[in-house]
Image (cartoon, rainbow, N blue to C red):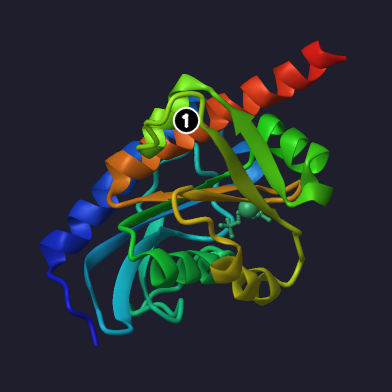
Amino acid sequence: MTSYSLEQRQAAFEELREVKAEFAAKGWFPGTSGNLSVRIGDIRGEEFQFAITSSGKDKSKQTPEDFLVVDAAGQSVETTKLKPSAETLIHCEIYKATGCGAVFHVHTVFNNLVSEWFGDKGQIPVEGVELIKAFNIWEEEAIIHIPVLPNYAHIPRIAEQVAGALVPRIPGIVLRKHGIYAWGANSFEAKRHLEAFEFLFEYVYRMELLKK
Ligand SMILES: CSC[C@@H](O)[C@@H](O)C(=O)COP(=O)(O)O
Ligand SMILES: [Zn+2]
């Protein structure tokens, strides 16, 4: 059963459309990769719905078939031929575990490089960089650790590990040699978090080279 209005659905699609265009301009959707979602309405018990990008589309193009609405199990709640993102179950797990309002996923060269460099350690350390304030971490010279999970072809296998891998104050999780999932209370916050993560990954990558 759906618990949102047509206006809410349209507003969610519009929000996704804007973020998608901005990320596309940064080159963050190579080869049809990446997926974006925003929750529509509140989480009611275990029930919630969210708008998500449809699978396999060129996310740098804007078309009338870019988004659809799914439920907490990742099933479409609308009669449509569109398929939700192949990684919808990961979004479901992040919404359930965090109660967030938006989840954004991109593949970039920097997130792939650092995920592999620190993959065996299971976390990417970031030491004393100002931009961690984007995560509302205000301690001076704080050291944070961004979790890295192994990447599996079978998405349910990834999804079942998400909740256990989350680190409370870090609004993101990296899949090794795949990409990052970042989230926030709404799309504004999720975007701020994702942009901060990508800045930090480039910083970490370049710093590792400087140390050599
Ligand atoms: C085309 S490679 C990327 C995909 O395998 C996947 O990881 C991805 O991010 C996009 O999948 P999608 O089903 O379009 O949401
Ligand atoms: Zn992906």
Residue drawn 19% across the image and 53% down it: 11
The answer to whether one can see residue 83 in this image is: no
Q: Locate residue 72 relative to residue 172 in the image: left or right.
A: left
The residue sitting at the bottom extreme is: 1
Which residue in the rendered view is the most extreme toward the front?
140
As shown in the figure, which amino acid type bears the numbered disc 1?
Ala
Is label 1 within 8 A of ligand 2 (CB to nearest ligand atom)? Answer: no
Quadrant location of the N terminus? bottom left
Quadrant in which residue 150 is drawn:
bottom right
Residue 7 percent coordinates (x, y)? 11, 60
Point out residue 105 in the picture as x, y percentages from the top left corner. Answer: 53, 48
Quadrant in which the C terminus appears:
top right
Res 143 → quadrant: top right
Position of 48 relative to 67 (above/below): below
Q: Is residue 83 left or right of residue 184?
A: right
**Closest to the observer: 147 or 1?**
147
Q: Which residue is mark 1?
A: 196
Residue toward you, 4 or 184: 184
